[in-house]
């Protein structure tokens, strides 16, 4: 599903809209978070989510360790985010 780029609730250029200030500023390394980031103009979707553990935070970027590896999220692309509970323990395989 794609959304029109002229949707009234979206800014004209979602890649440069100001991020929600302060959402990630208090996150310390070791905290598990979900971050919604704006995708570049021309993408089929407006946003994507990144789920992982904070490994570093600077004024310019948030670094997360995800299941797929390390992801650096520029803070200018962050639309919103939140702290989430630790991942559930993996279930052991069934014998069978």
Image (spheres, rainbow, N blue to C red):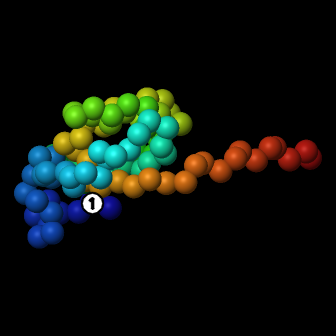
**Residue 59, quarter of picture:** top left
Residue 36, percent from left and from top: 33, 51
Looking at the rendered structure, the secondary structure element under dot 1 is loop
Is 4 or 58 nearer to us in this picture?
A: 58
Tell me, yes or no, if residue 2 can be seen here. yes
Residue plotted at (10% across, 64% down): 6
Q: How dense is the environment of label 1, judged by Cα within 10 Å: few (below 14), some, or many (20 and up)?
A: few
Residue 42, percent from left and from top: 17, 46
Is 33 or 40 nearer to us in this picture?
A: 33
Residue at image mark 1: 2
Residue projecting furthest to the right: 96
Is 79 or 96 nearer to us in this picture?
A: 79
Residue 86, percent from left and from top: 58, 49
Q: Is residue 29 left or right of residue 25?
A: right
Please state, as top left, top right, bottom left or bottom right, where the N terminus lies in the image. bottom left
Q: Is residue 19 left or right of residue 53?
A: left
């Amino acid at each position: 599903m794609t959304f029109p780029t002229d949707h009234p609730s979206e800014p004209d250029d979602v890649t440069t809209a100001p991020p929600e200030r302060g959402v990630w500023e208090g996150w310390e390394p070791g905290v598990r978070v979900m971050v919604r980031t704006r995708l570049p103009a021309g993408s089929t979707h407006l946003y994507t989510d990144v789920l992982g553990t904070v490994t570093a935070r600077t004024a310019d970027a948030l670094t997360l360790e995800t299941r797929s590896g390390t992801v650096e999220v520029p803070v200018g692309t962050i639309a919103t985010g939140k702290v989430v509970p630790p991942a559930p323990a993996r279930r052991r395989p069934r014998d069978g």
